[in-house]
Image (cartoon, grey):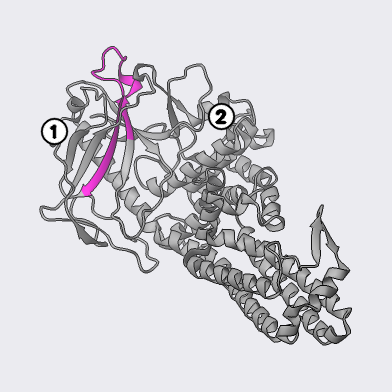
Amino acid sequence: MSGFEIAGVVLGSLPLVISALEHYSEGLSTLQRMVRYEAVFQQLHVIFESGWTTYMASCERLLMPLAISDADFKELLQSPTSDKWKDILLNQKLKARLGSTYMPYKVATKELHRKVEKLRKKLKLSETYLPPWVTAVDGQQIIDNAERSKFFKSKWIRIKGGIDSQGCTKLVDLIMRDIELISTMVKDAAELEAPRKRRQEQQNVSYWITIRDHARRIHNTFAACWSQPCRCQHSHRANLRLDVRKPEPDDSPTRVRFMFSLCFDQMTGSPATVPWDWRHVEIESYWYSQTSLKLPAPATTVRFSTSTPSLNATAPAHLNRTISQPTFSAPQITDLCDTLRVPSKRPTALGYLDDQAWQHHLYSHHHTQQIVSSLRIVSLYDVISSRTRGDISTKEKRALALKLALAVLQLHDTPWLPPTWDSKNIQFITNSPNNPTSLFEPSYVACSFSAASPGQCQQQRSSNGRILSKNPMIFALGVALIELSYGMPLLQRALPSELDDQGIPNANTEMLVAARLVKDIRNRELDNYAWATARCVECDMGYPFDYSLEDDGFRAKFVEGVVLPLKDDYEEVFAEV
């Protein structure tokens, strides 16, 4: 049995021992020569009941923060022998919650169970923890007075010279000590869980900065490839997929892959004239050295990147652990457009783009379920505008909310996501012209590349009133979260007083509508989503010294106040099995 299965068994056995001790106390009170033991067992009964209360509280404290239904929570505590304690996902959550305390908790729980079993045998209780003179009938305990009298007058009692009250007392004391130890472990784990989680996430901020730098570097490489007039005479478009990423374990090398869907800008030609239609590729970047690659060593302190690393010179200074150059036999790509002409029927290495100190390895990614000739691009604005109001599911909302928050964290200060982005910048690639686009579909941000506009982000908008925001990019995230909550574009919720004299939105309309709607967001959403939205709209992260994501402290507060709450909501509905 796992430590948590045993915890359930112990939780179920303790009240049965309490009942047995009560039966002993009552039985001893009826026998004159045994009356001296009555007070002892009454005291043991009180002590054991107190211990059971403490143990029950530790189980509640362990289970309370988990995303489980009220029915499951009740069953775990009131029917501890049920199979719920064997649930693999529950055990994973509990193990993660205890952290490094898990193994000591498991050992202590097994030891507690062993001692409870020893007490059961010492008291001559059955496997179901009933004294010999008690039987269970239809959930009721029936006492056989004659059998009880016979028990206390038995040879067992005479041989022992009476009941081993001292042995029982000593064993109960040891059981209470184990219960207190387990309770302390759970309390400490509960108190340390939040700061431990926050500390780890803060340490992971350098991981997000690494991703940001990779994304910017790949954009510059695309721009270098396609900024000169291409032989195809068309403008190219790179769609970067927004993924929910998890920082890798400290002891493993960082491998950051980006998924791109490459095509031609829709405004520069028809499908009949372009040399290829859609190409789905993955790109993984490596710092190149003739002798080694250096990767991040395990972090030992909370530290954030404070400067923008050189994109074309050497590896960042914090990359200080050496590994071998990965094997990559594909050739260097000198003409990216020409390389993409031949479609790949299976995933394969296409080659690498050389960027002085960096190599960007390209792999084809074959989409077997999509007919590429029918793919089209729709924006998040188009999707929510075409949906019936309120038709966005909780899962869709939580999935996209986290992706958008991570996009801001990973793509700020890059051409992929401008400071004044909005729902028109977030796009979906779909082959369903008639069916509503699901927000579960992969979402993208895009840039166009041509000699005239190397790396221009799609759907640039005027900043207008957003310039009044402390951080326009984070305010834009707040607007997007409001739009997902209401299932419609923000300006469609504008009141006449928030428009100009002609009834048209002006520079202040968006700020006014967002400030009004965010006050009601708590009535529409659960706390995590509501607070994250409010913090974005008001740009209030509890850090008044700077409002730029380039600032270490502000970036950490953004992770803590926005990303982590949305991540908790996401994991609640997309729990890994």
Decide: few, some or many residues near mark 1? Use Cα within 10 Å; few <14, some 14-19, many ≥20: few
The reply to whether dot 1 and dot 2 touch (C-beta < 8 Å) is no
Earlier sequence position, callout 1 versus callout 2: 1
- In percent of width and height, residue 343 lies at 24, 23
Q: How far apart are marks 1 and 2 (CA)?
A: 41 Å
SS at mark 1 in the image: loop
- Residue 293 vs 22, above or below: the answer is above
- Residue 275 or residue 506, whichever sits in front: 275
Outermost residue toward the left in this view = 290
Residue 469 in sight in this render = no
Q: Which residue lies furthest to the front in this view?
A: 155
Q: What residue type is labelled 2?
A: Ile
The part of the chain drawn in magenta is 260-286
Left or right of 6: which side holds 548? left
Element under label 2?
helix
As rendered, which of 118 and 536 lies closer to the eye? 118
**Where on the picture, by quarter, is residue 217?**
top left
Q: In this view, does 142 lie to the left or right of 375?
A: right
Q: Residues within 10 Å of mark 2 (few under 14, many from 20)?
A: many
Is residue 119 shown to the viewer in this render?
A: yes
Q: Label 2 belongs to which residue?
A: 384
Please name the residue that numbered disc 1 is placed on.
334
Q: Nearer the viewer, residue 21 or 93?
A: 21
